[in-house]
């Protein structure tokens, strides 16, 4: 488990601030120069070709140059606007305390270290609490604006006690659909989160198109407004994702449920409009925040395969073609004719797959039974053959799996 905390500097002298600023500017300049010379994707080739030249032109420590080279290899663009240089403990960095300040001492140049004082605010208190809980900080980073980033990790694997129910999450471009399912197939709760994100981003898209057209015509003020709009959009999404994950984890604790999400992978391009919507889904950022929240609240986060989650009918168990052709937000089963919200049904399928995998792990026989419908239909097509489930049967019950429409 890894996480990063940005620590704010405090009480920097003019000479120390000048040293940090010059170092950041030289590091960014070196990174962009290496980007121009990058011909191979191999880090070793880049190191052999440019290390001696970088050492002479900047006089950085060897560890600093190697970290900049790794940033260049990971960069996907042609230019870098900012860079965070990492310093390893204890070789190139160390920490110490005085009566009034906590210092991070960075070895930016050979035989020359700079002690940076850290402001004891909420971020620093959070950092100290994590250290007391067993987290280890072996790397500190210096950002382009002169702030310190602490990269913490906890290597010991933690296994949380298994909770009774499963909370499945389906992530899409307009909302987060959530379903809480009991082991007997009963749906305890179904709801949506984050509907306001798409509404707000749609307005931002419209403003961005207008500002982009003015920027193309040469308007300098429109270009500045466009940069502020991008930053405002980023901050809004990050804050809302944090609020949504807090609500979801609180719901999981309320219903005594573990959390399951899909293991989404890269998709094949299907057109400009579709690609734009899919690429706007903040799945990776949401997953990072959710992992951190689940770890803090001792909730197990399960990653299930996304195979057939959008094609499976939760009423009869049949696997169809997926979304309704006329309306992408609705799912229509060609076998039983049921029409439900596709996002809500997909979150239900994620929870069911997690329950089936759990039952297959705890079951000593080769048969796993799951109760969800009054129709005797096999649901083995919901899982792949290598998921550990050989046979899946259905019990007889009078209640369908979907909860009433919200």
Image (tube, rainbow, N blue to C red):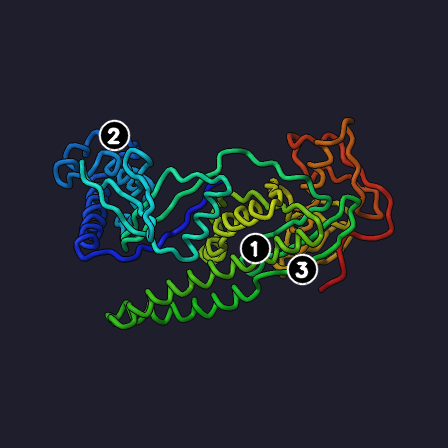
Q: Tell which tag, 2 or 1, sits nearer the viewer.
A: 1
The answer to whether marks 1 and 3 mark residues whose Cβ atoms lie closer than 8 Å is no
Gap in angstroms between the C-alphas marked 3 and 2: 52 Å
Asked if residue 217 is positioned above or below residue 353 in the image, the reply reads below
Identified at 78% across, 39% down, the residue is: 378
Give the mark, 1 or 3, whose residue is nearer the N terminus: 3
- Horizontally, residue 353 falls left or right of residue 2, namely right
Q: Which residue is mark 2?
A: 45
The answer to whether marks 3 and 2 mark residues whose Cβ atoms lie closer than 8 Å is no
Identified at 72% across, 56% down, the residue is: 189
Q: Which residue is mark 3?
A: 191
Question: Looking at this view, is 402 or 131 the one in front?
Answer: 131
Q: Tell which tag, 1 or 3, sits nearer the viewer.
A: 1
Give the mark, 3 or 2, whose residue is nearer the N terminus: 2
| Residue 88: x %, y % from top left | 32, 37
| Residue 253: x %, y % from top left | 67, 51
Quarter holding the C terminus?
A: bottom right
- Horizontally, residue 281 falls left or right of residue 253, namely left
**Mark 3 packing: few (<14 Cα in 10 Å), some, or many (20+)?**
some
- Farthest residue, direction left: 56
Secondary structure beneath disc 3? strand
Question: What number is the disc on residue 245?
Answer: 1
Identified at 21% across, 29% down, the residue is: 48
- Horizontally, residue 112 falls left or right of residue 264, namely left
Question: Looking at this view, is 39 or 235 the one in front?
Answer: 235
Asked if residue 213 is positioned above or below residue 268 in the image, the reply reads below
**Mark 2 packing: few (<14 Cα in 10 Å), some, or many (20+)?**
few
Gap in angstroms between the C-alphas marked 2 and 1: 42 Å
Identified at 73% across, 63% down, the residue is: 405
């Amino acid at each position: 488990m890894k996480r990063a905390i940005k620590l704010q500097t405090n009480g920097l002298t003019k000479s120390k601030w000048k040293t940090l600023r010059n170092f950041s500017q030289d590091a960014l300049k070196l990174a962009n120069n290496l980007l121009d010379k990058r011909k191979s994707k191999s880090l070793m080739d880049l190191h052999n070709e440019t290390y001696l030249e970088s050492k002479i032109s900047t006089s950085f420590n060897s560890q600093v140059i190697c970290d900049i080279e790794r940033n260049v290899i990971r960069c996907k663009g042609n230019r870098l606007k900012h860079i965070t240089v990492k310093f390893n403990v204890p070789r190139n960095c160390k920490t110490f305390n005085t009566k009034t300040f906590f210092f991070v001492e960075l070895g930016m140049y050979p035989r020359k270290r700079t002690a940076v004082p850290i402001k004891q605010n909420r971020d620093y208190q959070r950092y100290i609490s994590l250290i007391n809980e067993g987290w280890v900080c072996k790397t500190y980073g210096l950002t382009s604006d002169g702030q310190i980033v602490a990269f913490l990790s906890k290597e010991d694997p933690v296994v949380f006690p298994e909770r009774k129910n499963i909370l499945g999450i389906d992530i899409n471009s307009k909302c987060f659909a959530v379903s809480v399912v009991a082991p007997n197939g009963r749906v305890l709760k179904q709801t949506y989160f984050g509907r306001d994100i798409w509404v707000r981003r749609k307005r931002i898209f419209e403003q961005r198109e207008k500002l982009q057209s003015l920027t193309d015509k040469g308007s300098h003020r429109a270009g500045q407004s466009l940069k502020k709009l991008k930053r405002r959009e980023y901050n809004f999404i990050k804050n809302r994702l944090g609020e949504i994950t807090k609500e979801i984890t609180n719901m999981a604790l309320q219903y005594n449920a573990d959390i399951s999400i899909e293991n989404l992978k890269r998709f094949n391009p299907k057109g400009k409009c579709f690609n734009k919507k899919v690429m706007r889904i903040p799945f990776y950022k949401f997953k990072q925040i959710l992992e951190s929240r689940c770890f803090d609240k001792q909730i197990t986060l399960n990653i299930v395969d996304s195979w057939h989650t959008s094609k499976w009918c939760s009423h009869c168990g049949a696997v169809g073609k997926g979304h309704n052709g006329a309306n992408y937000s609705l799912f229509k089963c060609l076998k039983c004719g049921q029409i439900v919200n596709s996002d809500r049904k997909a979150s239900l399928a994620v929870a069911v797959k997690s329950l089936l995998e759990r039952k297959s792990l705890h079951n000593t026989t080769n048969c796993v039974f799951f109760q969800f419908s009054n129709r005797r239909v096999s649901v083995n097509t919901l899982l792949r053959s290598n998921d550990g489930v050989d046979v899946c049967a259905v019990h007889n019950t009078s209640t369908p799996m979907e909860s009433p429409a919200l």
